[in-house]
Image (cartoon, rainbow, N blue to C red):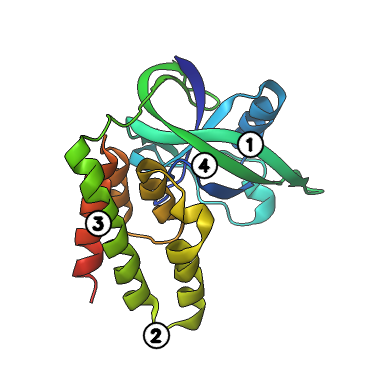
């Protein structure tokens, strides 16, 4: 079990194997990130279930740097990783990358104030069956071709998708890693992404991802 600091950001669902750029300005979260940097603690970037208390909307940057804003309740399943500090600005704001490493399931609260820490256990995929593994190869190929078709009108998007389809790094990913890394490239509604994150099978994620892509006009 691991104690994980919670950074709730409405609309943000993160997946293992992805990189999340983070701009931290709120006082309690600057303290939290400094704690993570000092102790190598994990931080979870997660889509919140609901708003627990509404903070006062800051009128300017100075107010944002000296006040705490809304407090949110996280979902029970989220991804977490370690912080890489890129720069601390003169006013105290922090620019970071969070290297999202693994999924966790929230077990119980350790601390709520000034920032949330929860005790969590890893949430790995169950092994796919032999039949599912065989089907995954077909699903990956169909997803790749569907992405190419959707990206065709946009040269910039097509360049990104062609890397997914043809790059050795992507071709060599496990089914689980591939099914997570896709969401560093394509985006859906946060609630859909949360449902995908909570699936315990790469086969289930690949199947549902293809269904979603086929629904795109």
Is label 4 or label 2 in front?
Answer: 2
Residue 165 on image: x %, y %: 42, 65
The tag earlier along the polypeptide, 2 or 3, is: 3
Q: Which residue is mark 4?
A: 69
Measure how far apart labels 4 and 2 are at the Cα level.
Answer: 41 Å
The tag earlier along the polypeptide, 3 or 4, is: 4
Residue shown at the point (24%, 35%) measured from the top left: 128
Q: Assess whether mark 2 and mark 4 are in contact (beta carbons under 8 angstroms).
A: no
Q: Can residue 102 be seen in the rendering of this structure? A: yes
| Image quadrant where residue 171 sits | bottom left
Q: Name the residue at the bottom extreme.
A: 153
Measure how far apart labels 3 and 1 are at the Cα level.
Answer: 36 Å
Q: Which residue is mark 3?
A: 138
Q: Which residue is mark 1?
A: 83
Residue 152 on image: x %, y %: 39, 81
Measure how far apart labels 1 and 2 are at the Cα level.
Answer: 36 Å
Residue shown at the point (26%, 37%) measured from the top left: 201
Side of 132 where 23 appears, left or right: right
Circle 4: element type: loop
Measure how far apart labels 2 and 3 are at the Cα level.
Answer: 25 Å
Is label 2 or label 3 in front?
Answer: 3
Circle 1: element type: strand
Q: Which residue is mark 2?
A: 153
The tag earlier along the polypeptide, 3 or 1, is: 1
Determine whether 163 is above or below 5 in the image. below
The tag earlier along the polypeptide, 4 or 2, is: 4
Q: Residues within 10 Å of mark 1 (few under 14, many from 20)?
A: many
Residue 98 on image: x %, y %: 59, 42
């Amino acid at each position: 079990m691991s104690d994980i600091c919670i950074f709730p950001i409405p609309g943000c669902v993160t997946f293992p194997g992805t990189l999340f750029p983070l701009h931290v300005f709120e006082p309690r979260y600057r303290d939290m990130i400094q704690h993570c940097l000092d102790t190598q603690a994990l931080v979870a970037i997660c889509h919140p279930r609901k708003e627990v208390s509404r903070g006062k909307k800051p009128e300017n940057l100075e107010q944002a740097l000296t006040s705490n804003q809304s407090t949110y309740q996280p979902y029970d399943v989220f991804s977490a990783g370690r912080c890489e500090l890129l720069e601390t600005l003169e006013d105290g704001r922090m620019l970071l990358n969070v290297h999202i490493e693994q999924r966790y399931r929230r077990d119980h609260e350790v601390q709520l104030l000034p920032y949330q820490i929860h005790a969590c256990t890893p949430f790995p995929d169950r092994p796919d069956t032999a039949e599912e593994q065989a089907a995954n190869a077909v699903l990956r190929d169909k997803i790749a071709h569907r992405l190419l078709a959707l990206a065709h009108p946009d040269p910039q998007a097509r360049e990104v998708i062609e890397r997914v389809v043809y790059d050795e790094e992507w071709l060599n990913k496990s089914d689980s890693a591939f099914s997570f890394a896709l969401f560093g490239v394509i985006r859906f509604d946060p609630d859909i992404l949360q449902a995908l994150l909570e699936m315990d099978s790469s086969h289930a994620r690949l199947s549902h991802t293809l269904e979603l892509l086929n629904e795109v006009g």
